[in-house]
Image (cartoon, helix red, strand yellow):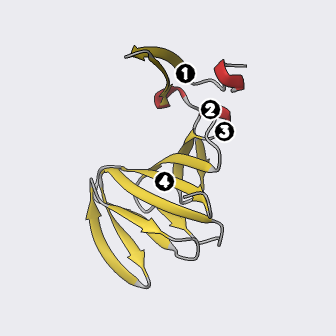
Amino acid sequence: MGAGGRQRVGAKLTRMQNSSEGDIMSLTVIDTDKLPRSNAPNSGEFTEVINKVLCGAENVVGTLHWLREKQHLDSRGDGKNHRLIYLIEGAGTITLNSKEYAVKKGAGVYLGPSESAIIMQNGVAPLKLFRLAVAKGQI
């Protein structure tokens, strides 16, 4: 068990204390390179980097995704979660409402609970995505 009652799950988690004008702030640093990755057919590698177990986040899940040639992330609306998808590296295509948009590093899309998108990797470099899901009613 880690600080604040959180589990340590193989990642290098560091808790730091910083005092500024009498206030104490706690910071959790998560070394995402040390987190275990899972693999999904046609959807590439992924790992959760923000969740209750790792850092005590309630109603929020943050996931890194790595897509290679012909792989895609299908982010379907489930009626429960708001989602933000941000492209960290690479280039791809986002399909929204049957329309395709070319995107590259720095692009992002917000999806409401009933909205869906498909993000496809393009080019030679892998596409690295950050996907943040927040439970409906929590934002």
Q: Secondary structure at mark 3?
A: helix
Secondary structure under tag 2 reads: helix
Q: Residues within 10 Å of mark 3 (few under 14, many from 20)?
A: few
**Contact? badges 3 and 2 (CB < 8 Å):** yes
Q: Position of residue 122 (x, y in %)?
A: 32, 62
Residue on which the image places disc 3: 52
The location of residue 51, given as percent across then percent down, is 62, 41
> Is the N terminus in the top left, top right, bottom left or bottom right quadrant?
top right
Q: Earlier in the sequence, mark 2 or mark 4?
A: 2
Distance from Cα at disc 3 to Cα at disc 2: 6 Å
Q: Which residue is mark 4?
A: 131
Residue linked to disc 2: 54
Q: Earlier in the sequence, mark 1 or mark 3?
A: 1
Residue at the image position 45 percent from the left and 59 percent from the top: 84
In the image, which disc is placed on residue 13? 1
Q: Which residue type does callout 1 highlight?
A: Leu
First along the sequence among labels 4 and 3? 3
Mark 1 and mark 2 in contact? Answer it, CB < 8 Å.
Answer: yes
Amino acid residing under circle 4: Arg
Separation of disc 4 and disc 3 at Cα? 16 Å
- Marks 1 and 2 sit apart, C-alpha to C-alpha, by 8 Å
CA gap, disc 4 and disc 1: 20 Å
Would you say the residues marked 1 and 3 are in contact, meaning their CB atoms lie under 8 Å apart? no
Amino acid at the residue labelled 3:
Lys
